[in-house]
Every structure is written in structure tokens, then in C-alpha cells.
Image (tube, rainbow, N blue to C red):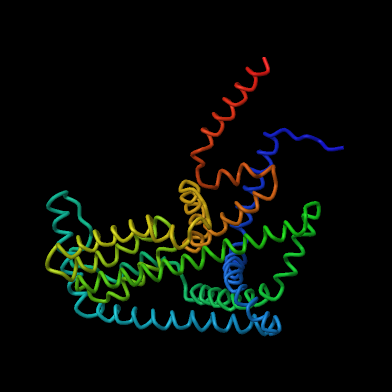
Amino acid sequence: METNIPGYIKTVYIALLIIIIVFFMIIAKQLLVPLLISGYIAMLLTSSCNFLERRKIPRSVAAFICLLLFIGLIAGIVVFSYYQVSGFMHDVGTNLQEKLNSFVIIANNWCLDTFGFDLGMRNGFEMKKAVEIVQPENTSATQLVFSLLNTLSDIILLPVFIFFLLIYRDHLAIFVTKVFRRQNNDGLLEKMTSIRRVVHAYLMGSGKVMLILGVVNTAVLFALGIEHAIFFGMFAGMLNIIPYLGPSLGAVLPFLFALITKDSAFYPIAVVVAFTLIQFLESAFLTPKITGGNVNLNALVTFIGLLIGGAIWGIMGMILIIPTIAILKKLFELSPDTQPYAYLFGEEDSNWFRRRERRSKAKAAKAEEEA
């Protein structure tokens, strides 16, 4: 005999489940972060694996080839970034450091004369103080070594996780169908495939948008005569992976660099105006055209998710939270009990009240006819 559980009891259960999940995410951060990253990369590489497997290549070999190509792509990006960053740091260590010091002294004197507030940098910007702010005094060399080893272990775990997830992807899909055995297996597998496609489309679309923005930002900075335009432009494009906050952070560095290195205020203002215009065009035309309605999350849920992801896992959490919420939305759509939460995550349905009004009028007209 089936028991009808009141709606508010179900809401309490789901709220408790969410609290337990968040607590588990905090405790198991060291394992979950590389596992989630590996899962999303595996979803991204699944279509390439399927392509190779249709050419009669064994699954393990196909997974290894895709993983090797992906590592080669990442290695190329890392090498490119290294040369850009090293060129920028070389300038920081020579003429730029002198200009930065003079600019900081002027700003410190202005604050002191105008507001009576001393920034504590009368002699310029001291790198030693900045290092002390970032690195606590009680951090020992042993702790730094262990921190480095933890980072290296995470990097080593990533390709291992990706390889096994690619090999056992069908096994995991069958496991889910056994968990939800009361539902139609074919329909369930189709929904799981749609989840993978959503993540794949989101990641591919985000990559295309970041590349286009990086090229456009670089071209604008070149036109303005800003040095290290490639570094600033591509870095700002990569930060676009963090919605709302990333584009603003990407404009800060070239703005400060132009403010310090250029003699006219036109250049930093032009950088801000150009980046603002580019981000407006991106949000209004570029992202909807490329990613389309793949994620379909409303802005409120996205912003709250960014705050929660940042509080739990830092910057990496802000990057991972959007595809994770998109997957949760699709999972909530699987059960009638959780479909309201899927609606809560999605975009606003502006025609809902109109449809309800039309249905009410139709019922009233039908009632009048029967009377």
C-alpha cells in the first residue's frame, strides 16, 4: 500500500538532503574536486571516444588516444601561458616596478592629503609585504612541501580518473538504470545521454566563447597600444568561465597596467569602455548564439551557486558549480516529486500566468454552458 507523504514533509527531506550533500562536499573536497573535473572532461571526450570506437578501435585504446590528445592540448596552452607570463614578469621586474612605485607613492600622498588616510606605502610598493599578506608567517617549509605534493597528486589523479571514467561509462550508466529500475530503462538512458550532451555542449560552447573573447580582447588592446596585449586579452577571455565575476576581473589587470604605464587617462578609460562593450555583446549575442539554451539556469540561481561554490571550494568551485547545477536540474526532472525544484533552477516562464488565466476562462465558459 502506497503512503501519501505531505508536501511539506518532502520539502523538509529534500532540504536535509541538500544540507548533507553540502557538508559532504566540504569534508570530501580533496577527492570530489579532481573527480568532478575528471567527470566533466570525460563527458567532453566521450563523443571523440565513440567516434574512434565506431572505427573498430578498442575502448581502452580509444580512451588512451583521446586522453593523450587532450593532455597535449593542455600542455600547449600551459607552454603558451608560460611564455606570456614570463614576458610580463620580466617587465614587472624592470621598468614597470619603478613606475608602479612612483604611482603608488602619488596615490598614497593623494589619499593622505585628501582624506587624511595613510596607505602605508610612502616609499612605494614593497614586494616583501605583499608576500607576507599572501603567505602567513607561521607557514613552514614542511607545510609548503606538503601543499605542493597535494597539488601534484591531484594533477596525477586527473588523467587516471578520466581514463577509468571513459572506460567504465557504460557500466556506470547500467548502474543508474538498476537504481531507478521502476522506470523505463530506454527512457532513463536517453535522459542520461541528454545530461551528458548538456555538459558537453556547455563546455564546448564556453570554450568557443572564451577563445573568441580572448582574440577580440587582444585585438582591442593591440589597437590601444597596450603592451602584453596577448597575455591580458587571453587571460580575460579565460576568466569568462566564471559567470558575472570573471569578465569584471579580466578587465582589472589591463586597466591597472594602462593606468601605470600610460601618460594619458584616455587609455585606462578606453580599456574599461571597450571591455564593457565586448562583455555586453558577448552576453547579448555571442553566448546565446553559441551555447543557446543548453544550461537554462536563471540568473538568481547562478549567482547563489557561484557564492556557494566559492565558499566551499574556492575559485575551482565557482568554475564547477554551473555544470553541476545543470546536472542537478536534469536529475530533478526525472522524478515528479522533484520537478518543482527543476523549475526553480530554470528560466522564468513568462507565459505561465497567461496560460493559467486562459484555462480559468475556458473552465468558466464551460461551466456556464453546462449550467
In the foreground, 248 or 338? 338
Q: Going 68% across and 50% down the picture, which residue do you hit?
A: 334
- The quadrant the C terminus occupies is top right
Q: Nearer the viewer, residue 208 or 158?
A: 208
Is 212 located above or below residue 85 in the figure?
above
Q: Provide residue 332's location: percent of width, then percent of height.
A: 65, 49
Quadrant of the image containing the N terminus: top right
**Image-quadrant location for residue 61:** bottom right
Residue sticking out furthest to the top? 371
Residue 355 drawn at (x, y percent):
55, 34
160 left or right of 215 in image: right
Above-or-below relation of 324 to 203? above
Tell me the residue at 64%/56% (across/down). 24
| In this rendering, position of residue 67 left or right of residue 242 | right
Percent coordinates x, y for residue 149 in the rendering: 55, 77
Which residue is at a point 66% across and 38% down the rendered structure image? 12
Question: Which picture quadrant has residue 370?
Answer: top right
Q: Residue furthest front?
A: 369
Say above or below: 32 vs 82: above
Q: In the image, 137: left or right of 41?
A: left
